[in-house]
Amino acid sequence: MIYVVIAFLWVSICLYVITGGADFGAGIIELFSKKSYRNQTKKIMSKSIAPIWEANHMWLIIAVVVLFVGFPTIYTTVSTYLHIPLVLMLIGIIARGTAFTFRNYDAVEDSWQKLYAQIFFYSSLLTPFFLGIIAAATISGSIDPEAKDFLSLYIFSWLNPFGVCVGFFTVSLCAYLASLFSLHEARFSDALPIMKKKARETAIYVVVTGVLVFVSAHYSDIPLLKWIFSKALGIIAITLATISLLFTNEAIKKGHFLLVRIYGGFQIIMILVAATYQHNPNIILFANGSHLSLFDESAAPKTIEALGWALLLGSIFILPFLFYLLMSFGNQSRKDPE
């Protein structure tokens, strides 16, 4: 049953990065849009994320519950050494959700709308940035449990060049996903050429920030290139992601926008596979060379078995209704081409 629990953990993280990433990216795209067509961008992005923007966080909740119940030592370690970026990320999620609600559903449109918009923009930017920093800290060996001072324990464990570059890379990925996901919603709109341009631009940003990640890893003595390219699986994953990027461009040209979403999600999965497969199941790497493994740090067998059955049975109810939600709002968008 441990493999079922780990599979749910990995799938929930992937789905949160994809769906939540596109969610956060909507605010990023709107933030960096020109004022002349920001209103058009707002309408498209709101239509794209409004149906399921709260449901996206379900995957994050599942991942947190799995860690808390199934791998308490790993949960404790992350929430201790990385509590500052975690709190900042959670504040961003709360602020963004609140701002989105008041911005789109407030009964009165007044000067407060400008404040809601700014909160929505910058929380959409900062939340994935800190998510990337947290991810970088777990695999970079920057967490030093033997450190004696506050800065080394709780600041420099995550605030370093590699973490910052991964943060920017995560922000770029979110903007890229949002631009791809918005194409389907913009297919009947005059904003479609703008969204296509955004998709091309954000793809370039992903490549540029990806290069920065490798450069920062090299100067930080993190063997990222070795992790990814020393075995066949990493090479295959990166190759498939690159080929998928070419297919994405062709699908955009032909107007196959649902296929574009699939390609975008596939690219994210391949990136995650390439970045993590080498040290799997070790989920946290420490500065002293030790690590925390999903197998070694799991809860008692009966707890894992109960958690596994709960996840399996819960998915029977959750997934059909989530699919129904997506289909319902997809049909609604066809009736409302504005």
Image (cartoon, grey):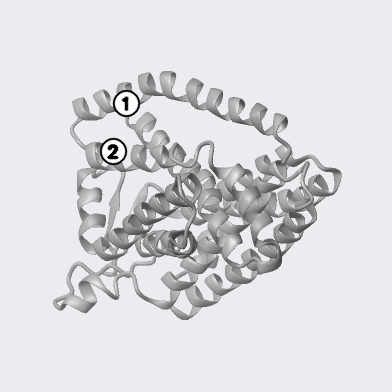
On the picture, is 296 further left or further right than 246? left
The label on residue 308 is 1
Q: Quadrant of the N terminus?
A: top left
In the rendered structure, which amino acid carries the disc numbered 2? Val
- Residue 232 vs residue 246, the one in the foreground: 246
Which callout, 2 or 1, points at the residue further toward the start of the chain? 2
> Callout 2: 10 Å neighbours few (<14), some, many (20+)?
some
Where residue 53 appears, as percent x and y from the top left, is: 48, 42
The label on residue 193 is none
> Callout 1: 10 Å neighbours few (<14), some, many (20+)?
many
Where residue 100 appears, as percent x and y from the top left, is: 46, 50
Circles 2 and 1 in contact, beta carbons < 8 Å: no
On the picture, is 265 further left or further right than 93? right
Q: Please give the name of the residue rendered at 32% of the width and 64% of the height, measured from the top-left corner.
A: 85
In front: label 2 or label 1: 2
Q: Please give the name of the residue rendered at 25% of the width and 37% of the height, measured from the top-left corner.
A: 70
- Residue 68 vs residue 336, the one in the foreground: 336
Where residue 293 appears, as percent x and y from the top left, is: 30, 48
Does the image show residue 167? yes
Q: What residue sits right under mark 2 in the picture?
A: 65
In the rendered structure, which amino acid carries the disc numbered 1? Gly
The image quarter in which residue 29 lies: bottom right
On the picture, is 318 further left or further right than 301? right
Assign a secondary structure to mark 2: helix
Q: Quadrant of the C terminus?
A: top right
